[in-house]
Image: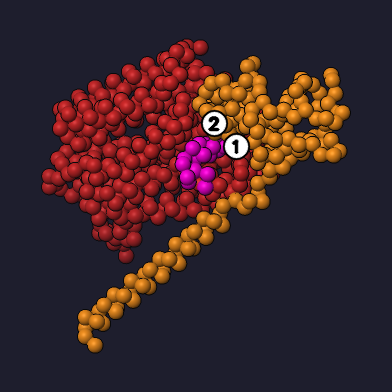
Chain colours: A orange, B red
Amino acid sequence: MGDEEKKSRRDFLQRASLLVAGGCGALAAVEVVVASLPPAAARRDYFSVGHLADFRHGTLTFLPQPEVFVLCDDRGLGAFSARCTHLGCTVRRSSQGFQCPCHGARYDEQGRLLAGPATRDLDWFALHIDADGGVWLDRRRRVPAGTMILPELPGVKQS
Amino acid sequence: MKRAGPQAGLFFHLHPARVAASSLRPTATLGLGILSAVLFALLALSGTLLTLYYLPTTSQAYGSMLDIQYLVPLGGFLRTVHRWAAHLMVVTVALHLLRVVACAAYRGRARNWFIGLGLGASTLLLAFTGYLLPWDGRAYWAVRVSTGMLDNLPLAGGLLRGLLLGGDSVGAATLVRFYAAHVFFLPLLLLLLFVWHLWRLRRDGGLARPGEPEQLLPARPHLLVREAALALAACAVVASAAWLWPVELGAVIDTVRPADPEKAPWYFLGVQEMVSHSTLWGALLVPGLLTVFLAALPFADGAGRYTGVWWGAGRRRSLLAAVALLALLVMATCLWLEWRQLRPAGIHPSAVMTILALLAGVAGWLLARSRRAALLAFFVVMVVALGGFTLAGWWRGSGWRLLLPWAG
């Protein structure tokens, strides 16, 4: 066995062990990152919004938990996010509708974009009503702005 | 037996044993590196004492802050010292970076330049993670606003935000993560990088200077005396600031109703202001361009004379001064238009300033035929812009209106 052959074998072993060590290191790094990511269970998407009997015509209710506004008028019930579509601050009521206190985006009373750094309307979410008249909001299901559901159940009281 | 030689002791293996006479002149560095190190030591000391009382859970953090502020003997002073030292360290580290760019001290020292950038990033992250810990309304919303900006980074933004927050929004997991990062991981990283930074500085032959051979003086006493004086001055300034302007706790946290307006910590106010004009420019293009500039700087600039001399050759200083003046004028005009609410909707001041910076770079190249002049011209405009946007963010009032403090 020549020196050349020995040397090339040593080179090969050196490279192979470096590769294996590097691979293990990379896997460990990926594992650290994955372990640091928030678990899916930390996200909640389904929220109880209240009961049909709770809503009055011409009202806007703010729900702190999923940070949504629930709008109730003669077209029915609709829900839209209070989170500014720009960078996620909670918008505040203003004379025109809503304004974001973080970068000044403005929306009208139904969450449609008026001005500012945001580029789209506030997110509207699907609502559904169970057999007992409980209203539920599904944060995974977006609907076009202005989508209202008109419950057939007797319950939406005229004020 | 006491050894008096210049290399005596472990300390002098890290600390230079001899130092060039020109490096000792106050104008060589303005002492900014030493000041940053002193402030870090002060922060480590006061921070260690604060950990004795601070409780990093969402239900206890604010209460423990109240205890520190009002019950612990000298606790309020200690906390204020920590806070002022943190603000000042962000300033001195930023000025240190400015100094290194202005003096082209990165030349031939790319590795130490990048270690320095790592130190700067660690400083910002330390200041930012510490901002959340009081768990008052101001801290909560500042962190929510700042981390919200990450959503605009393509691909990695959401991932990065999840890693930082440990959940969908700022909550219990975020507080624990920020605490762990603030008291352990980041100080450790900063300390390691700092030691490496100093060691590289010694290996590279001390401070960058024009290169004429010159006399080397023993660091003890010549450098040590100056370091001690700077350390005492820094302590005096921090203690006086803490005494004169004590920092009160913010209001109790309200995760539902933000104040109006809600602002990021001051060192991110410039970005917040730019983002309020345009997310693309403010959160992506300007920070991206600056990152590329800083990363490419030691390679874009070649070797040359006047290394270690502020702003390079004398005749280029007037060019740079003109560029700075022009940038100030344009920036002031942008702010005035914003204040009078006359800004056309599609015109973003951050875009205007960036284009001006690029043009200044081209002009610097054409007029001076020097890569350094071109890079400096670009950098000067960007620094003026960042300063202007930070001020504008500072002056934003209710309804995100720009309110000039002297104009009512």
Residue furthest to the front in view is: A152
Q: Residue at x 54, y 31 (%)?
A: A86
**In the structure shown, which secondary structural element does the residue marked by tag 2 occupy?**
loop
Q: Residues within 10 Å of mark 1 (few under 14, many from 20)?
A: many
Rendered location of residue B377, percent (x, y):
25, 30
Q: Is residue B392 above or below residue B37?
A: above
Residue drawn 58% across and 42% down? B133
User: x, y percentage for residue B151?
Assistant: 51, 39
Q: Looking at the image, can residue B236 be seen?
A: no
User: What's the magenta bit mostly, secondary-structure-wise?
Assistant: helix
Q: Residue at x 57, y 40 (%)?
A: B132
Secondary structure category for the residue under label 1: helix
Q: List the residue tagged with mark 1.
A: B140
Q: Is residue B351 left or right of residue B62?
A: left
* B146 in the magenta segment: yes
Residue A97 sits above or below residue A29 on the image: above
Residue B38 spot, x, y in % from top left: 40, 44
For the N terminus of chain B, the quadrant is bottom left
In the image, taking residue B122 as reference, residue B261 lies left or right, namely right
Residue type at mark 2?
A: His
Q: Which mark is residue A86?
A: 2
Q: Nearer the viewer, mark 2 or mark 1?
A: 2
The span shown in magenta is B139-159
